[in-house]
Amino acid sequence: MPTRFHLLLTPSGVTLERAMQFIQGGFSYRTKKELELNIEVWERGYIAHRIRDANDYARHVEYIRQHPAEAKIVVSAEDYVSSSASAGFEVDPCPLD
């Protein structure tokens, strides 16, 4: 997506909140440094949804895969090259199985 991304994350050794701090902090620092920008890169907060079970995981995987097509950025989800729906990407198995 041009202005956002969706991510399914299974942190290991840290909390989800700490993992997001690492991701957001590192990305913000690098973006501001490399592009010589002095702007906020992230919106305040993020939507954290803890996956409840294998069905919930499958539903979120499918939502993420289909979002570029539903947003009318591409005709088919497979056409969005930065998506796991694109050829060559493989989604990890559900960690709840």
Image (tube, grey):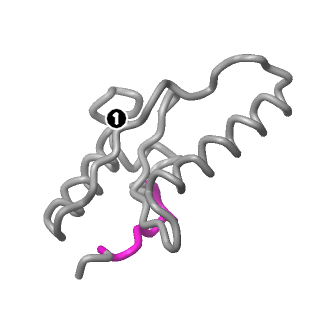
Q: Position of residue 53 (x, y in %)?
A: 17, 68
Q: Quadrant of the C terminus?
A: bottom left
Name the residue at 32% across, 76% down.
95
Q: Give the residue number, with chain letter if any, for mark 1.
A: 75
Q: Is residue 54 left or right of residue 91?
A: left
State which quadrant residue 24 falls in.
Answer: top right
Q: Is residue 88 above or below residue 86?
A: below
Question: Among all residues in the image, which is located at the extreme bottom?
Answer: 97
Q: Position of residue 89 (x, y in %)?
A: 49, 64
The number of numbered discs placed on residues in the rendered structure image is 1
Q: Is residue 19 left or right of residue 63?
A: right
Q: Is residue 52 left or right of residue 16?
A: left
Q: Position of residue 81 (x, y in %)?
A: 52, 47
Residue situated in front as seen by the camera: 52 or 87 = 52
Residue type marked 1: Val
Name the residue at 52% across, 73% down.
13
Q: Position of residue 17 (x, y in %)?
A: 46, 51
Q: Is residue 81 magenta?
A: no
Label 1 sits on a secondary structure element that is: loop
State which quadrant residue 28 falls in.
Answer: top right
State which quadrant residue 25 falls in.
Answer: top right
Q: Which residues are magenta?
A: 86-94
Name the residue at 77% across, 17% down.
38
Residue situated in front as seen by the camera: 95 or 93 = 95
Q: Is residue 62 above or below residue 52?
A: above
Crowd around label 1: few <14 · some 14–19 · many ≥20 (10 Å)? few
Residue situated in front as seen by the camera: 33 or 62 = 33
Classified by dominant secondary structure, the portion drawn in magenta counts as loop
